[in-house]
Amino acid sequence: MNSPLQVLVVDDEPGMRQGVKRALRDFTVRLREINGDVHFEVAEAATGEQALESIASQAPDILLLDHKLPGMSGLDVLGKLADGEQDVLTVMITAYASLDTAVAATKRGAYDFLAKPFTPDELKGAVRKAAKHLLLQREARRLAQEKRQVRFQFLSVLAHELKAPIGAIEGYLRIVLHRQAGSDQATYDQMLDRSLFRLTAMRKLIQDLLDLTRIESGQMKRELVELDVAAVAAEVVESFAGQASEAGVTVSLAGSGAVMTADRQELEIILNNLISNAIKYNRPDGRVDVQIGQSAAAVTLAVADTGIGMSAEEIGKLFTEFGRIRNDKTRRIVGSGLGLSIVKKLAALYDGDVAATSQADVGTTFTVTLGKSLVPGLVPGATAVRSRALE
């Protein structure tokens, strides 16, 4: 942490104020929770009135507030602060500690107490505790705000993605219902085909959303076993035989013997997304080449196609939620824009990543790297078993 925390000590004894400044002058707190060091700068005030003026001018992070002050008491200062919006953590300093004082101060917002006389170590302990609480509280608020913003953006995009197809389907069905296109059955059949096309896209979007939610929430059940990745890939490739044939695309698989601890469903989701995209964004008589490789530390899944390709700018948009490439070539291709984001998140579960290289009108290659050194016990919700097929 670069900026020091500001401490205001309020006490009518000059020696006490100077003692606090000396104790905290070179004091540093190492907080693993924020991965940084915290330093302190100390200002001082002799009365409650001076403290409020100082706080109004520049609010401190931590307030070391004496209970017994000339004129306005420490409790009075707390009461004034409770009416404002300052983000200040207060530690009461008192030689008159009592249950009644503690209850009253707590009700007015005090975080902790430090009884006089106290040692430099006791002071540092109270300040360390207050600094940790304050910074974790601020970090929690920041993350909550960031989460709200991400959720808002996500729902806004989702609403946009669903609004258009629902509107189109509704429009087609009303035309069919009221026979507004005349008596030509072929016209109505075309509208129904378009409606089914839109429904297929929405079903894909919903399934991808469910996958994404399970991954990010940690609720996806995982069964980690030793798997022959090439064997899993062969089954996935076989499942696309019909789609590839219909699209006029040839799919091939190369590589064998790559064994790692993994969840079969997760590997299938990765391969399904990559092979499906490679077929959809290909050209008639095109090829999809799936290559399984391994090193001592990782397994690689590479899927190359001879399709429409992408520019470098378009590649940069790929791995975000709803990051679809929209142009005349992709307008009629069904996709949720979530598949590659899911692939990236799944790869991260194996300390891996996904990368893409492409050339417009030549083709694209996606390469997923999965680490072999997965430790099942460190993966939430995972069950580690050994595949009998490999024993």
Image (cartoon, grey):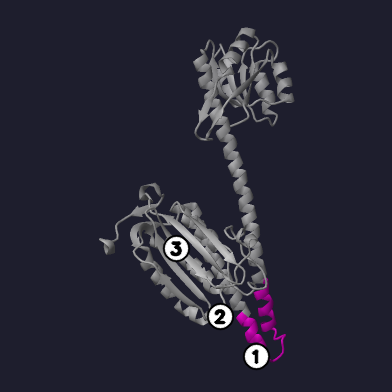
- Secondary structure under the numbered disc 1 in the rendered image: helix
Disc 1, disc 2: CB below 8 Å?
no
Is residue 145 visible in the rendered image? The answer is: yes
Q: Give yes or no for residue 189 being in the magenta stretch.
A: yes
Q: Is residue 53 above or below residue 180?
A: above
Location of residue 214 in the rendering, given as x and y in whole percent from the top left corner: 48, 57
Q: Tell me, for residue 185, which label it has, or none.
A: 1
Q: Tell me, for residue 205, which label it has, or none.
A: none
Number of marks present in the image shown: 3
Q: Residue at x 60, y 67 (%)?
A: 359
Quadrant position of residue 268: bottom left
> Is 107 situated left or right of 388 in this image?
right
Whole-number angstrom distance, CA of label 1 to CA of label 2: 30 Å
- Quarter occupied by the N terminus: top right
The residue that mark 3 highlights is 301
Q: Residues within 10 Å of mark 1 (few under 14, many from 20)?
A: few
Residue numbers of the magenta segment: 167-193
Q: Nearer the viewer, residue 380 or 73?
A: 380
Q: Amino acid at mark 3?
A: Leu
Q: Nearer the viewer, residue 28 or 360?
A: 360
Q: Is residue 304 above or below residue 320?
A: below
- Secondary structure, magenta segment, majority class: helix
The residue that mark 2 highlights is 284
Quadrant position of residue 341: bottom right
